[in-house]
Image (cartoon, rainbow, N blue to C red):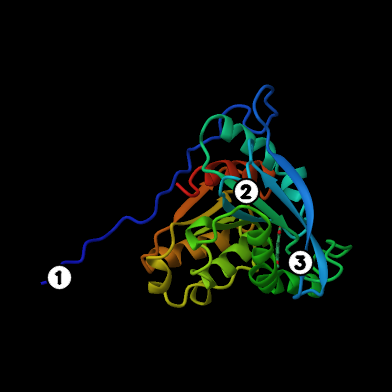
């Protein structure tokens, strides 16, 4: 007779704190580079800006994993750089030997010609462009990155993560495309996140494929319910994931720590 054993899939780690000075520039360590480049998008019918972080001592003779990292409802391709201190946090982690070699690709997550946040960030067309971005990402951006940078192109070498609207996009697109992304991270995912039954209609299709499914949120965030309902459903369906709730609100104090914690797990 087959004996079913209850498995503890969820690993809450709500007590982890970032190291002192994790988001402060450290002198005398090798630094990565951040550049803005443009890629041709057939989806939008325009060249689109994307920020790309290449790690310290980046070399074309080596191959890298790729993290696609998405912004929130009021942001654009510069948000993780200006507000998230992405390059500082990752430079410091590289100096401490805590990261696998990866480049970080930070696109504009609104797939439309005028992709600025605009005056009304909740404008229907702008919100719609966040979901249209799935096609731009899969058909335009990823092929551009993989033909322009020395990167691995297997599913286990691609991660998709983001904050708030970008967290919703990461869950929606990542779980819809398990053959493309093996690593998924959602930081304070917004209400654009599909309802759980639509997000993971066939749990068996993702259970064995995911290397990491990470959902995190501040305990005081009004959008915590989105993370909670997703976490509850994944738990019921036995989908392995990490659920990380820390004291905090809907802001970069939480998201910088999320990046710090999540990035160390990638491609390991
Ligand atoms: C909403 C509340 C917040 C929503 C989106 C957000 C689409 C996004 C917040 C962010 O990205 O910071 O009702 O609906």
- Does 1 appear above or below 146? below
The reply to whether residue 159 is in sight is yes
Q: Which mark is residue 110?
A: 3
Q: Position of residue 210 (x, y in %)?
A: 44, 62
Q: Is residue 227 left or right of residue 70?
A: left
Q: Position of residue 154 (x, y in %)?
A: 50, 61
Using a 10 Å C-alpha cutoff, classify the residue at mark 2 as few (fewer than 14 neighbours), some (14 to 19) or many (20 or more): many
**Who comes first in sequence, dot 3 or dot 1?**
1
Q: Which mark is residue 268?
A: none
Q: Is residue 77 left or right of residue 206?
A: right
- Does 200 appear above or below 185? below
Residue at 52%, 63% in the rendered image: 181
Q: Which mark is residue 2?
A: 1
Q: Which residue is mark 2?
A: 103
Q: Nearer the viewer, residue 63 or 236?
A: 63
User: At numbered mark 1, what does the secondary structure look like: helix, strand or loop?
Assistant: loop
Asked whether the beta carbons under mark 3 and mark 1 sit within 8 Å of each other, the answer is no
Q: Quick one: quadrant of the N terminus?
A: bottom left
User: Looking at the image, how many numbered discs can be counted on the residues?
Assistant: 3
Ligand 1 shows up in the quarter that is bottom right
Q: Nearer the viewer, mark 2 or mark 3?
A: 2
């Amino acid at each position: 007779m087959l004996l079913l054993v209850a498995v503890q899939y969820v690993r809450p780690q709500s007590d982890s704190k970032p190291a002192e000075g994790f988001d402060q520039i450290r002198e005398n360590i090798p630094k990565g580079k951040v550049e803005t480049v443009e890629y041709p998008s057939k989806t939008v019918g325009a060249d689109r800006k994307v920020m790309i972080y290449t790690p310290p001592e980046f070399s074309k003779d080596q191959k890298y994993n790729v993290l696609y990292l998405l912004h929130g409802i009021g942001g654009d391709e510069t948000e993780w750089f200006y507000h998230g201190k992405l390059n500082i946090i990752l430079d410091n982690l590289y100096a401490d030997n805590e990261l696998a070699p990866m480049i970080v690709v930070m696109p504009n997550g609104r797939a439309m010609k005028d992709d600025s946040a605009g005056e009304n960030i909740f404008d229907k067309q702008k919100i719609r462009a966040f979901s249209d971005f799935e096609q731009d990402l899969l058909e335009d951006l990823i092929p551009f990155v993989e033909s322009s940078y020395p990167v691995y192109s297997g599913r286990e070498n691609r991660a998709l993560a983001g904050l708030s609207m970008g967290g919703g996009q990461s869950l929606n697109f990542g779980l819809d495309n398990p053959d493309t992304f093996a690593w998924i991270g959602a930081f304070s995912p917004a209400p654009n996140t599909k309802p759980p039954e639509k997000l993971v209609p066939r749990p068996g299709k993702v259970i064995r494929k995911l290397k990491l499914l990470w959902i995190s949120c501040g305990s005081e965030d009004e959008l915590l319910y989105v993370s909670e309902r997703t976490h509850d459903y994944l738990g019921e369906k036995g989908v392995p994931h990490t659920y990380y709730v820390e004291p905090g609100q809907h802001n970069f104090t939480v998201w910088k720590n999320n990046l710090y914690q999540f990035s160390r797990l990638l491609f390991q």
